[in-house]
Amino acid sequence: MTNSSPSQHLFADVLARVHTACAALAEEGALPAGLDLSRIVVEPPRDASHGDMATNAAMVLAKDAKSKPRDLADRIATRLQADGLIDKAEIAGPGFINLTLKPQAWSDALRAVLREGEGYGRSRAGAGEKVNVEYVSANPTGPMHVGHCRGAVFGDALASLLSFAGYEVTREYYINDAGAQVDVLARSAFLRYREALGEDIGEIPEGLYPGDYLKPVGQALAAEHGNGLLSAPEAEWLPAMRARAIAMMMEMIRGDLAALNITHEVFFSERSLIEGGSDQVAATIDFLRGKGDVYEGRLPPPKGAPVEDYEDREQTLFRATAYGDDVDRPLKKSDGGYTYFASDIAYHKTKFDRGFLNMVDVWGADHGGYIKRVQAAIKAVTAGKASLDVKIVQLVRLLRNGEPVKMSKRAGDFVTLRDVVDEVGSDAVRFMMLFRKNDAVLDFDLARVIEQSKDNPVFYVQYGHARGFSIFRNAREAFPDLPEEDAARRAFLGDAAVERLTDPAELGLLRRLALYPRTVEAAAVAHEPHRIAFYLYDLASEFHALWTKGRDLPHLRFIINNDAEITRARLALVQGVVSVLASGLAVLGVHAPAEMR
């Protein structure tokens, strides 16, 4: 059992103490009453030699206090110096305050891990705020490829991270089932339907989808309709082909995502916006027109690079420039149909209508130019009440021993997500897709991600977790009553004399464990799950280094046969590492093995 009600973590505790010091100065008249303290932060110093934490309190309050930052820092530092948790408070630079904590702070942080287990780091920061995370949203025209894979993993990990940080998260997939591409899919499926009925279809014509993945669709359609559609005009068979093909493609996509342990709560159909008795796109355009945000007019010719949706004609335009975009945007095409952007506005309005003021969209690298117009539209349809953060996921270069990987025979012109997961496993795919910032191109080498070495981050982190369990197994010779079940083992170690952990490497691990809850909150606020992956690698590296140090210096080994007290303290430290590694890996959707095979 993990504690579902997290205790205040160390950085938040010290921040509260800084607030208390500032409040005391306000009572004395040294600071104005009612100051906004929200700009104060407590964070690790850039240089570890400067102390354990640093605060900008004097820097952000000096102007309101009508004081020089260093003078105010001196007063705040004097207050903090008297705090029972703080050993030293020193002023640095223009007015930063570096804090060194008393050793008990690190012992108490470890005890918090032992109490909370994998729940350590869970936060109330989100305060239950509803967040909609829309990710993948691949066109339902075929199996998912490696590029989709990165966006899928990123979006899923971000959703888990936000949930862990206290937000109420909805995972959503937008099915693009109303554009020209699904009509192409229907015509491609019709070709495979003819093939399933015994016709030699020859080469797949240019412009249709060539992959073998459509053969089962053709066979299903042949089983359902026999040859009854062969002589029908396209207007009759296209809707049936389209609906069946989309349904089977979405079933395939759900299967591909399941291979990565990814599920969505909501699958929202673009076609549902205009079908089913109400045209929500038209209603949204009318709503914007009523606000003066839609008009009939002509766009000036684009300067420089061509704009993909520019037409020199009178048309229905959204006044995007009033909300920060570079040009106003068309809402209807020359044939009278809606632009993709018009549907996108209506779709995002449905999110707002469903109660989401906080939206995150995960898009591919080729959609960067689309961000400003959608953010402008959301400002317009929500009167500025909702915000959209678009996370661009850059390309994946798939390699094998440094050489580009050939295309998939099944898909026709790309490597499928399923091919990659089947070869290296979902853990390697998920962790490595997150071990680089989302907006940087990722080289994914199929050979290297299964190596058992420090150069393979997913192995190194999982091995850290497994090594902890190996230490527990070995320790049962000295402690036969060391429980195997996690909660019981944490309780057994909860009163260990962890104050005896005084070696710099041990203290370094304690500090790293204390940093985890702050890392979670910062990663959630920034929408950057890669920070968790980086943190886990650093934690595992320090743990492996301490193990190696104990091999060279016997007095630092985790198990000291003639000193039960220090052994118990070190087992408590191992438990802390194991719990945090398991917690972070769970956020990323990666397994935490008890042994490596």
Image (tube, rainbow, N blue to C red):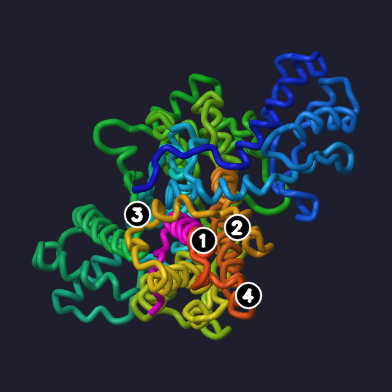
The residue that disc 1 covers is: 565
Question: In terms of depth relative to the viewer, which is nearer, 248 or 513?
Answer: 513
Residue at 25% from the left image edge and 32% from the top image edge: 277
Residue at 58% from the left image edge and 58% from the top image edge: 535
The residue that disc 2 covers is: 500
Q: Please, what is the dominant secondary structure of the magenta stretch? A: helix
In the rendered structure, the answer to whether residue 320 lies left or right of residue 269 reads: right
How far separated are the C-alphas under marks 1 and 3?
Answer: 18 Å
Question: In terms of depth relative to the viewer, which is nearer, 213 or 130?
Answer: 130
Residue at 88% from the left image edge and 20% from the top image edge: 66
Rendered location of residue 159, percent (x, y) = 44, 48
In the rendered structure, the answer to whether residue 327 lies left or right of residue 591 reads: right
Rendered location of residue 490, percent (x, y) = 41, 54
Residue 92 is drawn in which quadrant? top right
Q: Are marks 2 and 1 in contact (CB under 8 Å)?
A: yes
Sequence-wise, the earlier of marks 4 and 2 is 2
In the image, the segment drawn in magenta is: 573-597
The residue that disc 4 covers is: 549
Rendered location of residue 379, percent (x, y) = 55, 30
Q: Visible in this render: residue 159?
A: no
- Crowding at mark 1 (Cα within 10 Å: few <14, some 14-19, many 20+): some
Q: Are marks 3 and 4 in contact (CB under 8 Å)?
A: no
* Residue type at tag 2: Arg
